[in-house]
Amino acid sequence: MPFSFTPDQKQSAFWLGLGVAFVLLLYALGPVLTPFIAAAMLAYALNGGVDYLDRRRVGRWPLPRALAVVLVMLLFLSAVTALVLIVIPVLQVEIPLLMAQIPAFLVRIDAVLAPRLQEMGIKFRLDGSGIRAILSQQFESGGDEIWTTVLSSARIGGTRVLGWLVTLVLIPVALFYLLLDWHKILDRITGAVPRRWLVQTVGMAHEVNVLLAQYLRGQLLVMLVLAAYYSMALTIAGFEVALPVGILTGLLVFIPYLGFGLGLILALIAAVLQFADWSGVVAVAIIYGAGQVVEGFFLTPRLVGERIGLNPLAVIFALLAFGQLFGFVGVLLALPASAVLMVAFRHLRHHYLRSSFYNA
């Protein structure tokens, strides 16, 4: 007897195939969807503030949601601008001083390494005056070459640069409309879920929302603690740029490796410029080494991992696994994505334990 599909099975197969085709279409349109995905992530993080303002009243009248969205976006952009204004002055001051101090720094390295290497039979010498002359020649004659290279790259990659500009413009526009219609969008998504799966889907979405909210709060605590730690430790060590460098290192810690690496480089530059001996470099090594140990083995596992139900080993594995699969973006999204997957696996395990396959 030939196998035949029931009408319900045919409908299920049709909608399943349509869903797979839709997912493949989204994958093919990945570069186009980048600003909208970024805007959706920001909208999820900022919607709580918009809802809070949306419930406030100005006299007898409620605050319009559009005005609440504008206020929250202005506050967010102000915070990003303040962070940029903290970084740029430090770079503008330190980089020229560093370029001027490089020859003297090389002479200091030569004075330390050359005698020890000569004791081992290795002839090693850094010619400070020669290096100074080479650097001066490069800076005097290399300006035209640098601009020629920049202009050539701009001509070659003009389309890519234009794409980045369009993305930067689209993100705030998409963010505004997403925040404005956030609850309507959620209602439409809920209304599109098949009725037989509605209760389970809404329940899982609620669990994911709770976990992600806990993740954001935990990550914010880690950022604040590390910003205070690096600022205080660098101040105690006598660094003049302790406050901006410490705040920058702590606030950028949500981007794994980038925040720590940039803060470490700035602190090392400050140590070379400010201290005549190696005490500054040693202080930076101790401060940042201890900070990395505290963050990796205590703060992130305890304040972030435990809040989303992941033990420290799971946190480390998530960072390594998502970094291997998706690169830098995967490292950035490892913990929130793990929270979502954990909810899915929890429900899958529940159905597995109730299945006839397990209980037979």
Image (cartoon, rainbow, N blue to C red):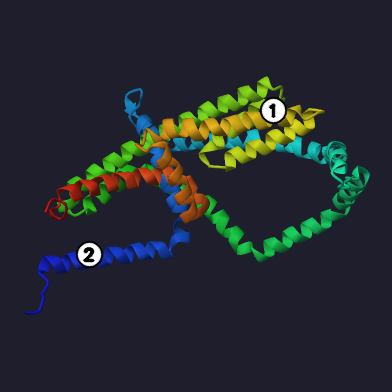
Q: Position of residue 36 (x, y in %)?
A: 43, 52
Residue that badge 2 annotates: 15
Query: Quadrant location of the C terminus?
Result: bottom left
| Residue 304 placement: quadrant | top left
Q: Is residue 352 above or below residue 53?
A: below
Q: Is residue 210 above or below residue 150?
A: above
Q: Position of residue 159 (x, y in %)?
A: 60, 63
Q: Position of residue 86 (x, y in %)?
A: 64, 33
Which residue is rendered at x = 78% and y = 57% of the image? 147
Residue that badge 1 annotates: 283
Q: Residue furthest left?
A: 1
Camera-nearest label, 1 or 2: 1
Q: Helix or strand or loop: what does disc 1 sit on?
A: helix
Marked residue nearer the N-terminal end (1 or 2): 2
Residue 222 visible, this angle: yes
| Residue 132 placement: quadrant | top right
Which residue is rendered at x = 56% and y = 28% of the image? 227
Residue type at mark 2 is Trp
Of the pair 297 and 51, the residue shown nearer to us: 297
Residue type at mark 1 is Ala
Q: Is residue 69 left or right of residue 148?
A: left
